[in-house]
Image (tube, rainbow, N blue to C red):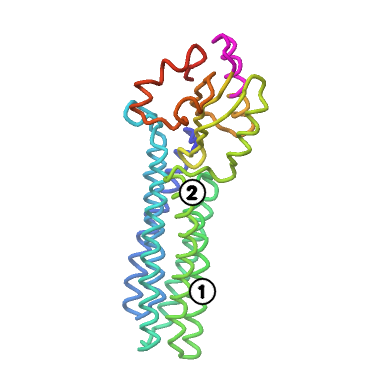
Amino acid sequence: MHVHAAPTGKMQNALRISLGVTLAYVLVTLFAGMRAHSLALISEAGHNASDALALLLSFVAVHFQTRPANDRKTFGYQRAGVLAAFLNALTLVAISIWIGVEAIGRFAAPVSVQPRVMMIVAAVGVVMNGCIAALLSRSGDDVNMRAVFIHMLGDTLSTAAVIAGGAAIFFTGMSWIDPALSLCIAALILWSSFGIVKETLNILLEGTPRGLSLEQIRVELETIEGVEDVHDLHVWSLGSQTHALATHIRIADILPSESARILDAINGRLRDRFHIHHTTIQFEHVGCEVEHGCVMAVEELSAHGHHHHGPGHHHH
């Protein structure tokens, strides 16, 4: 995630303001929900609490991303943001399941609701979420900000639904509308969090980044003059926008100065075509099948690795 000085300060301020307002609203909604016996309001409080959490975690993540890499965290703290989004999404899943269970219980044993309180509190929520969503949409587009923004947008809609539900209960007296709304809100929370779980888990498990194909990269590299074979190719994400690559490449037994030219060509191609800036490339001039199928254990590598490779072997 390429976070520069200016947007970060802006992002952090936006997050700080949003966080304070959201936490205050969670307390109000929870209290009002208890008073009005409205599960829809209580689930709104859960929904907003999950948002407050998303905001808090993103705030921490944005803070970490600005810290430079050091000897103990050699890639900086980019993963902190991804881990934050992942944990946030998992808590959301738990909250939505709880709301679902509660709502089903309410269908069996209806509870009478105070629709007036529902409507007032929800109206405040719509205004608040609308403002926060607007504030956030202007302050940055990394995965955290996007997660938080989607939350806020979903909240604005679900809170508007609570107003409509309050009105319906007010005019018809049907209290089952309340748990029905709660179920919809729970489904909404589940849906929005599932997407974040999937994307962040892929990064945490070192999956191939979304939108990159290993085959395409291999084919592209093999078109470079001097590259005979590309194998043991790995691509993974460091943060939501930074990718890294490691590979073994077979070249002819040539002078190191000539292999440097090939290396430059490879890095240039990776940078321009695939936006990959972190690379580790190992050159070999011996076919890999000679060397125990290339997937050597680390001990084996340090024991035999070096006298197999000859002059063409160097790291970048």
Classify mark 1: residues with Cα within 10 Å, few (<14), some (14-19) or many (20+).
Answer: many
Q: Mostly what secondary structure, the magenta segment? A: helix
Classify mark 2: residues with Cα within 10 Å, few (<14), some (14-19) or many (20+).
Answer: many
Give the residue pinned by disc 1. Answer: 161
Name the spot of residue 75 as percent of width and height, x first.
41, 31
- Is 32 contained in the magenta span? no
Q: Residue at x 49, y 66 (%)?
A: 126
Circle nearer the viewer, 1 or 2: 2
Name the spot of residue 205 as percent of width and height, x first.
42, 45
Q: Is residue 111 left or right of residue 185?
A: left
Q: Is residue 200 above or below residue 291?
A: below
At label 1, the amino acid type is Ala
Q: CA distance from mark 1 to mark 2?
A: 24 Å
- Is 262 contained in the magenta span? yes
- Quadrant hosting residue 13: top left
Q: Is residue 185 left or right of residue 258?
A: left
Circle 2 sits in a helix, a strand or a loop, which is it? helix
Name the spot of residue 208 as percent of width and height, x first.
52, 43
Front-lying residue, 99 or 278: 278
Name the spot of residue 46 as percent of width and height, x first.
37, 66
Q: Is residue 248 left or right of residue 12?
A: right
Q: Earlier in the sequence, mark 1 or mark 2?
A: 2
Q: Is residue 187 above or below residue 282?
A: below
Q: Are marks 1 and 2 in contact (CB under 8 Å)?
A: no
At label 2, the amino acid type is Met
Q: Is residue 259 above or below residue 82?
A: above
Give the residue pinned by disc 2. Answer: 145
Front-lying residue, 170 or 297: 297
Circle 1 sits in a helix, a strand or a loop, which is it? helix
The range drawn in magenta is 252-266
